[in-house]
Amino acid sequence: MNPHSENSGQFSDTVRSMPGGEFLELCYSCGTCTSKCMVQQKVEPTYNPRRLLRKAIFNLEEDAYDDLTTWLCSQCDLCYVACPQQIHISSILLAVRDLAIQNGKKSPITVARVNEQTCVACGLCVQVCPYEAIQLVEKKVPYRGLITVAQVDTSHCMACGLCGAVCRSTSIGLGDDFSDDRLVSELWQWMNPKAEVTP
């Protein structure tokens, strides 16, 4: 049985005990965070930090873990500077995400992947990752033996693509379905949502 089961009161207590979580109950659901969020406006319409905070307050643990808001926060903190209660919302969202990971949940985001056969462990991807999701590790790689390669923490990668942009050996990226043309097309649509998509 999950030690932080719904309605036990322990889930909200655990969130409150984590850095940033102590301000959980200051939220009075004004919605300012959601109105300022670029993720909600440009990426995922169901993204809603205040709803997630309410789920945490009311001990809706599994609902909080399954909510896309838990996984999509980019920690830009536009919500923090706008919040009239000065709640560091991204800290609470990260606390819920960490609890979700501890409970065996996996991020629904398609994260960066490393080609261990070509990675030269230069460390550029580690340096540019804004989410500290990449590190260099020593591991046994087929046909190469014990070597140092980049490794992606799938729970913290936000699929921003910076690692792939700086990799000189093109050993890390967002997968086969990702390309420069697709990126340009998505950026164009993001900047011009009413423009027609060219085939």
Image (tube, rainbow, N blue to C red):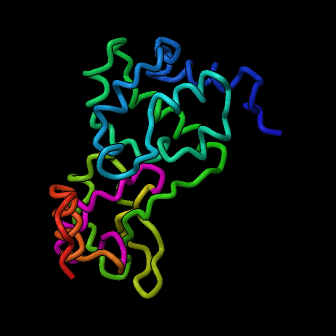
Determine the image quadrant of residue 65.
Answer: top right
The location of residue 83, given as percent across then percent down, is 32, 19
Residue drawn at 27 percent across, 55 percent down: 126
Q: Residue furthest bottom?
A: 143
Magenta residue span: 154-175
Q: Residue furthest right?
A: 1
The reply to whether the magenta stretch includes residue 160 is: yes
Q: Could you say where residue 91 lies in the image, as x and y percent from the top left?
A: 41, 28
Q: Is residue 199 above or below residue 30?
A: below
Q: Is residue 96 above or below residue 109?
A: above
Main secondary-structure element of the magenta-colored stretch: loop
- x 60%, y 29%: residue: 55
Q: Residue at x 16, y 73 (%)?
A: 168
Task: Give residue 92's position: percent from left, percent from top.
Answer: 47, 28
Q: Is residue 197 left or right of residue 110?
A: left
Closer-to-camera residue (26/148):
26
Quadrant including the C terminus: bottom left
Q: Position of residue 177 (x, y in %)?
A: 35, 78
Name the image quarter holding the N terminus.
top right
Q: Nearer the viewer, residue 172 or 76?
A: 76
Q: Is residue 58 left or right of residue 182?
A: right
